[in-house]
Image (tube, rainbow, N blue to C red):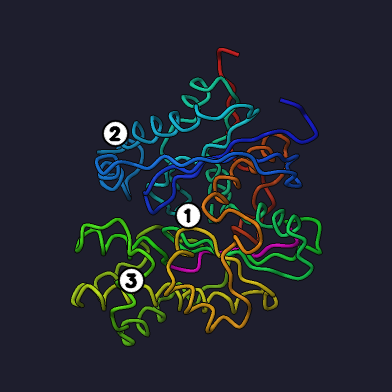
Amino acid sequence: MKRDGAIWALGTMSGTSLDGVDAAMIHTDGHDVLAFGPSDYRPYSASERAVLRAALGRWPGEAGVAEAAEVIEIAHAEILARFQGAEIVGFHGQTLAHDPANRRTHQAGDGSLISEALGLPVVWQFRDADVRLGGQGAPLAPFYHHALARRIGAQAPVAFLNLGGVGNLTWTDPRIPRPEKACVAFDTGPANAPIDDLVASRRGLAFDEGGALARSGTVDGGIIAAFLDDPYFLRMPPKSLDRNGFPALIDAVSALGDADAAATLTEAVVASVLDGLRHCPEPPRRLLVTGGGRKNSVIMEGLAARAGCRVQPVEAAGLDGDMIEAQAFAYLAVRVARGLPTSCSRTTGVAAAIGGGVFTRPETV
């Protein structure tokens, strides 16, 4: 791998929604994004998803974790083998548990196995160092969002909202060259995970397509008011969440019918994002939405009506909303390999800007 200049990097993401593995290539020097390469998606089967769900909340050595890691490693090796021309891989693995208050986080999957399978250097365990040094370990895409804001030619602050299993927001000012000075980031609240879990358990569906079930229901305002009283929303960023960070919300909707429960969980996503926007240093000019939640029209309409800025899927800016997280870990892999920071006090709360990640070369090379 070259020590400077742009290279082709391949990144992966298997998010908390547990739908599958995204993989994407970008051409980058760790500062700028010069070009986007191919991308692909490998869904988890129902049986694989069941293994992963059974391991959620568990730590290394606990029951079911080894089986989950095997699913993750096989799925990633399969999709990554489809790509050619990459010089480095950013392998995120699968978050099974996240407890930054006690300085621990668990992303299952062994990057050294991926490195051997591909014959390429792999950067993995992106979150560990940040958490050990007192950071939240999440979100980690903000520095990439800053690079994207520059690439699309933004001339004023913009916000990127990723709605995966959990929601996270990056406010960034592209006029400031260093991402450590230009970004504020944090998890906003629940996103797709509780909605997906609800429709899976009650309807046998993977997700509420387009928000159709939520649209047919009525929001329980009392549940939303109680949800917004959670102490999480009083905390200043940076802050992060585990996938199942609001058990009281899940319990509260359990007595509602399917449509009303979906409508209430969907409104919780919108309400938590709107609450999060007040933490931006100044109002963003645009709110660009990525992740599966951008395909939920009820969420998008709720944000557009109340956010106070233009709300658009990232495709409106010429970006691929299904692949930004995977691209981000390709970008971060290059930064790690070149000794550049990947998080800072304004994005994760870590005491100083650090480069997180384990760099592994294949033994056969």
Return the disc, 2 or 1, that comes first in the chain's sequence: 2
Front-most of 356 and 145? 145
Secondary structure beneath dot 1 equals helix
Residue range in magenta is 180-189
| Residue highlighted by disc 2 | 67
In this rendering, position of residue 45 left or right of residue 126: left
In this rendering, position of residue 78 left or right of residue 223: right
* Disc number placed over residue 100 in the picture, else none: 1
Q: Which amino acid does label 3 sit on?
A: Ala
- Label 2 – label 1 distance at C-alpha: 24 Å
Q: Position of residue 34 (x, y in %)?
A: 75, 44
- Please name the predominant secondary structure of the magenta segment in the image: strand
Relative to 240, is 300 above or below? below
In this rendering, position of residue 296 left or right of residue 185: left
Q: What residue type is labelled 2?
A: Glu
In this rendering, position of residue 251 left or right of residue 275: left
| Residue highlighted by disc 3 | 212
- Label 3 – label 2 distance at C-alpha: 35 Å
Q: Which residue is drawn at 62% across and 64% down?
A: 316
Q: In which quarter of the image is residue 249?
A: bottom left
Q: Does the magenta stretch include residue 11?
A: no
Q: Position of residue 176 (x, y in %)?
A: 80, 62
Q: In which quarter of the image is residue 321?
A: bottom right
Q: What residue type is labelled 1?
A: Pro
Is residue 238 in view? no
Front-most of 233 and 212? 212
